[in-house]
Image (cartoon, rainbow, N blue to C red):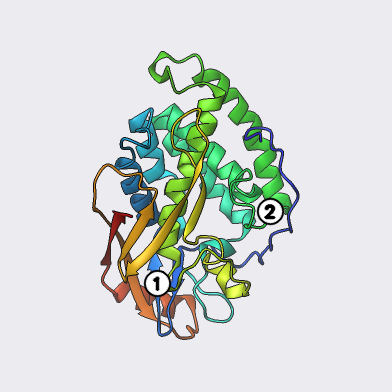
C-alpha cells in the first residue's frame, strides 16, 4: 500500500454538490435536535486522544510534539467556513461530508500550510492525511466512497508529488531521527487516522449506545458520517514493526465506553468536546439558521473511556 503514490481499488464516485452550497461542520442528528461541532473542536478531541496515547502495550508517539500537534490542528483550515454555517435547499444543516469539492480544497490547503509553518513533520502528516481521505484513507477505511470528481483529482495530483518531496526532506532532518523513514511516516499516518476516527465516532453519533460496528445503508447515515465512524477502528498501530490491531468501542453507559485493547496512559481517561445544540427543524434561510445557532451556548460533552 502506497501513501504518496496511491495504489487502491476504485470505489464509487463521490457526489459533487452544486456550487452555491458551502462548507460546514460536523453534525450529529438526534430525534429532536442537532448537535453541531466546529472542525477545530473535533480536532481538539483528536488531540486529546493523541496526548494520552501510549502505555506498556502501545508505543508512545514519536515525534510526540509533532503528532499531538497535527492531531489537534489537522482541520484548522475549516475555521474560515465554520464561523458561517449554512443549510441546504431543504433547510437542513450541511454536514462536513457534503462539502462542495471545489471549495473544500481551498481551505484544506490553507490549513496544511498553517501547520507546515510551525512543524514540517506535522505538516507532512496533515498533507498525507488529506490526500488519503478521498481515497479510502489509503485503504484503511474502504467503506468510505472514493472521490473521483475533477476537484479532488486535481488536489491529489498536486499534493502527492509534494508529499514525496517532503518525505525525502524530512528523512534528512536530525530532529526527526528515528521517525523519519518512509515506513515510520506510514506508521504515523495510520496513527493520525485513529485519532481522527476516534473523534469522529463521538462527534458523528448522537446516541453512542446505538452505534455498532455494522455499516448502515441509509443516505442519512452516510451524510452524517455514522455509516463510517463506528465502534470498530481497524488498522490501529501498536508498535512500529508489529501488526496493527482493531480497536473496539463498547458503550456501557450513555457517556462511558470500554476500549479494547486499551491504548491510553490513564485509566479511566476522561475527554471532552464542545458543541452547540439546536432544534431539529427546517430552517428557511442561512440567516435564520445562523441566528438560532449563534444564540445557543457552547456545551461541553464529556466521555469516560475504560479498559475491558
Query: In what element is the residue under mark 2?
Result: loop
Residue occupying image coordinates x 41% and y 13%: 174
Structural crowding at the residue carrying mark 1, measured as other residues with C-alpha within 10 Å and reported as few (<14), some (14–19) or many (≥20): some
- Vertical placement of 27 versus 55: above or below? below
Name the residue that disc number 2 marks.
Answer: 146
Residue 47 location in percent, x, y?
A: 34, 46
Please identify the quarter of the rendering in which residue 293 is found. Answer: bottom left
- Residue 83 seen in this snapshot: no
Specify the farthest residue to the front.
Answer: 308
- Along the horizontal axis of the image, is 214 left or right of 271? right
Name the residue that disc number 1 marks.
Answer: 209
From the viewer's side, name the closer residue of 126 and 99: 126
Q: Which mark is residue 248?
A: none
Residue occupying image coordinates x 52% and y 62%: 96
Going from the N terminus, do you reach mark 1 or mark 2 first?
2
User: Foreground mark, 1 or 2?
Assistant: 1
Residue occupying image coordinates x 38% and y 27%: 63
Amino acid at each position: 500500500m502506497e501513501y504518496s503514490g496511491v495504489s487502491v481499488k476504485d470505489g464509487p464516485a463521490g457526489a459533487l454538490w452544486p456550487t452555491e452550497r458551502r462548507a460546514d461542520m460536523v453534525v450529529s442528528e438526534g430525534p429532536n435536535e442537532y448537535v453541531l461541532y466546529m472542525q477545530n473542536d473535533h480536532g481538539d478531541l483528536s488531540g486529546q486522544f493523541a496526548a494520552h496515547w501510549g502505555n506498556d502495550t502501545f508505543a508512545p508517539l514519536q515525534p510526540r510534539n509533532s503528532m499531538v500537534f497535527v492531531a489537534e490542528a489537522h482541520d484548522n483550515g475549516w475555521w474560515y467556513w465554520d464561523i458561517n454555517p449554512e443549510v441546504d435547499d431543504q433547510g437542513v444543516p450541511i454536514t462536513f461530508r457534503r462539502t462542495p469539492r471545489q471549495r473544500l480544497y481551498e481551505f484544506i490547503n490553507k490549513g496544511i500550510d498553517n501547520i507546515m509553518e510551525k512543524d514540517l513533520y506535522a505538516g507532512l502528516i496533515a498533507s498525507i492525511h488529506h490526500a488519503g481521505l478521498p481515497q479510502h484513507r489509503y485503504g484503511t477505511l474502504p467503506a468510505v466512497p472514493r472521490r473521483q470528481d475533477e476537484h479532488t483529482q486535481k488536489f491529489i495530483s498536486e499534493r502527492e508529488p509534494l508529499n514525496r518531496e517532503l518525505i525525502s526532506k524530512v528523512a534528512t532532518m536530525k530532529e526527526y531521527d528515528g521517525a523519519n523513514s518512509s515506513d515510520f511516516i506510514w506508521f504515523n499516518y495510520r496513527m493520525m487516522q485513529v485519532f481522527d476516527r476516534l473523534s469522529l465516532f463521538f462527534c458523528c453519533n448522537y446516541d453512542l449506545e446505538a452505534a455498532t460496528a455494522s455499516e448502515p445503508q441509509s443516505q442519512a447515515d452516510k451524510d452524517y458520517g455514522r455509516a463510517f465512524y463506528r465502534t470498530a477502528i481497524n488498522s490501529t498501530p501498536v508498535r512500529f514493526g508489529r501488526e496493527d490491531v482493531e480497536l473496539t468501542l463498547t458503550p456501557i453507559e450513555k457517556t462511558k465506553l470500554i476500549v479494547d485493547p486499551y491504548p491510553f496512559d490513564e485509566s479511566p481517561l476522561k475527554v471532552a468536546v464542545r458543541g452547540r445544540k439546536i432544534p431539529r427543524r427546517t430552517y428557511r434561510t442561512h440567516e435564520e439558521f445562523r441566528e438560532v445557532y449563534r444564540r445557543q451556548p457552547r456545551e461541553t460533552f464529556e466521555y469516560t473511556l475504560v479498559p475491558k
